Every structure is written in structure tokens, then in C-alpha cells.
């Protein structure tokens, strides 16, 4: 894969409407102060189209291969919670010192500020830790598009429960999934996304098959026209500045 923030900066310069975000940045790869500065810069230079996509990370082989320290899962989740708190501070222009277990920022200056507060998407399906952080800090979640609707329904029900526990309106969170497009069958895809909409999914993110085949993009354009009426009114972030 290409390095994500170089790629997003290039994409920002080639487009005017594309929303821009990582799916998702492993928390251990970048210090949160620099990560928030990077996303804020992307937002300014793209005219307000950046997201912060973040998660606890998982790819130990890649991390070790590149010489990046790979903390324990417990520590990565603690780092993720601190990074999310720092993101909210820095996006809001709060320069007061931050002292956590893993990070210390004496003056988290973020100037120029983003044009809007970049929406925060947390990737992961863990019911105890990840979903609690989604309910507390995120504007959007990202779950894998599970093959059985009942399994995805269960995950969304647990997220609703975590929102109730945090005193957060469940409907404030944009529900997103990631899946593979697969065979170019328009009828099958229409039924598939009807099922996702029925479950309450707002945004389906797709890995495309052969990017060298123009037919993939023709199919995708037809599919977007077919499923557009399935959308529900969602928080403004979906209609303004997001990838």
C-alpha cells in the first residue's frame, strides 16, 4: 500500500469534492500531536475535506518489519484513548498542557486550525473497549461488512448500548462498513445495500476489484444511482467534508 497521508495530500490536489481520510491510522504509528497536525493541514489545504480515521492497530508483522514499536493491546488501547482526547483538544484550539500515561504535550499548538473540526472515525469491532471509545469520542464508526446480517445487527445493538451508557445519542454516530465489491452484479449489489440500509448503515465503503478495468467504475456509478434513495438524513458531516 501507499503511505496514506502522502496519498491523501496528492488526492486533495487532484480533486475538489472527494472526502479524505485514512481507514484507519494505527495509533502506534504516529505521535498524536503530529497526527492531529497532519490531519489539520490536510483539512486546510483541501478546503475542509479531511477526516481523522484512527484505531488501535493490529499489524504486528508490518510494524516489526519497519522498526516501529508495537506495544501490547492494552497499551495500544490506552494510547488510543489518550490520542482521541488530544484530538478533541487540538481540533478545538485548546493549547493547555496535556499529561497522560503515554503522552505529554506541553503546548499542543495547532495553527493554522482546521477549517472545520475533522470528523473522527474509529475503526474496530471490539464490544468492550472500541465501542466505548466510539460512543465517547467518535463521529463515525467503521465495522467490517459481516456476511450474516444478524452478526452485524448484534454489533450495532452493542454500539447502541455503549452510547446509552455514555449518555450519547446513538443517531449522532454515522454508521459505516467496509467490504469488498466482488462480482459486478447490479441486482445482487442493490439487494446487498438494501439490507445494509435496513440495518441502519449510513455509508458503505468498498474495496474495488480490478482498478485497471474501466468497467468497475461504470458499474460503481450505476450502483450509486441505484442505492442513493436508500439514504436517511444523517449528521451534516456526511454531506460536507469527509472520505
Image: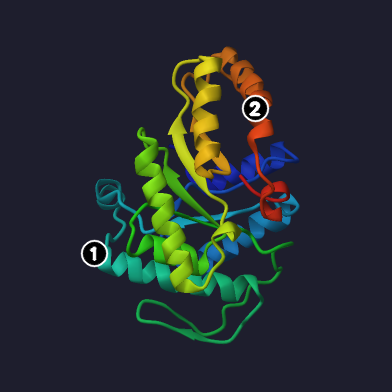
What residue is shown with label 2?
224
Few, some or many residues within 10 Å of mark 2 (<14, 14–19, 20+): few
Which residue does the image show at 35% across and 34% down from the upper left? 148
Note whether 19 is above or below 186 in the view shown.
below
Given residues 143 and 194, the one toward you in this image is 194
Quick check: 215 left or right of 237? left
Quick check: 69 left or right of 4? left
The residues bearing labels 1 and 2 have C-alpha atoms spaced at a distance of: 41 Å
Note whether 195 is above or below 130 in the view shown.
above
Which residue does the image show at 48% across and 42% down from the upper left? 177
Q: Is residue 32 in view from this perspective?
A: no
Which residue does the image show at 64% across and 49% down from the upper left? 242
Quick check: 156 left or right of 112? left
Residue 235, percent across and down? 67, 55
The C terminus - image quarter: top right
Few, some or many residues within 10 Å of mark 1 (<14, 14–19, 20+): few
Q: Nearer the viewer, mark 1 or mark 2?
A: 2
Residue 43, percent across and down? 68, 56
Q: Is residue 234 in view from this perspective?
A: yes
What residue is shown with label 1?
72
Amino acid at each position: 500500500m501507499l503511505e496514506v497521508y502522502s496519498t491523501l495530500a496528492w488526492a486533495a490536489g487532484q480533486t475538489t469534492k472527494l472526502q479524505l481520510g485514512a481507514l484507519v491510522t494505527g495509533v502506534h504509528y504516529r505521535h498524536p500531536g503530529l497526527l492531529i497536525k497532519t490531519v489539520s493541514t490536510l483539512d486546510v489545504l483541501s478546503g475542509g475535506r479531511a477526516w481523522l480515521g484512527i484505531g488501535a492497530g493490529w499489524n504486528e508483522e508490518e510494524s516489526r518489519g519497519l522498526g516501529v514499536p508495537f506495544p501490547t493491546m492494552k497499551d495500544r488501547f490506552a494510547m488510543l484513548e489518550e490520542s482521541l482526547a488530544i484530538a478533541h483538544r487540538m481540533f478545538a484550539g485548546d493549547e493547555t498542557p496535556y499529561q497522560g500515561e503515554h503522552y505529554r504535550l506541553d503546548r499542543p499548538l495547532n495553527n493554522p486550525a482546521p477549517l472545520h473540526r475533522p470528523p473522527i472515525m474509529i475503526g474496530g469491532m471490539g464490544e468492550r473497549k472500541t465501542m466505548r471509545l466510539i460512543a465517547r469520542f467518535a463521529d463515525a464508526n467503521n465495522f467490517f461488512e459481516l456476511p450474516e446480517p444478524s452478526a452485524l445487527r448484534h454489533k450495532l445493538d452493542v454500539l447502541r448500548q455503549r452510547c446509552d451508557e455514555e449518555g450519547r445519542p446513538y443517531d449522532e454516530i454515522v454508521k459505516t462498513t467496509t467490504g469488498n465489491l466482488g462480482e459486478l452484479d447490479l441486482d445482487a449489489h442493490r439487494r446487498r445495500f438494501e439490507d445494509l440500509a435496513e440495518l441502519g448503515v449510513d455509508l458503505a465503503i468498498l474495496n474495488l476489484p480490478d482498478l485497471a478495468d474501466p468497467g468497475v467504475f461504470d458499474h460503481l456509478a450505476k450502483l450509486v444511482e441505484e442505492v442513493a434513495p436508500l439514504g436517511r438524513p444523517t449528521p451534516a458531516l456526511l454531506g460536507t467534508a469527509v472520505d
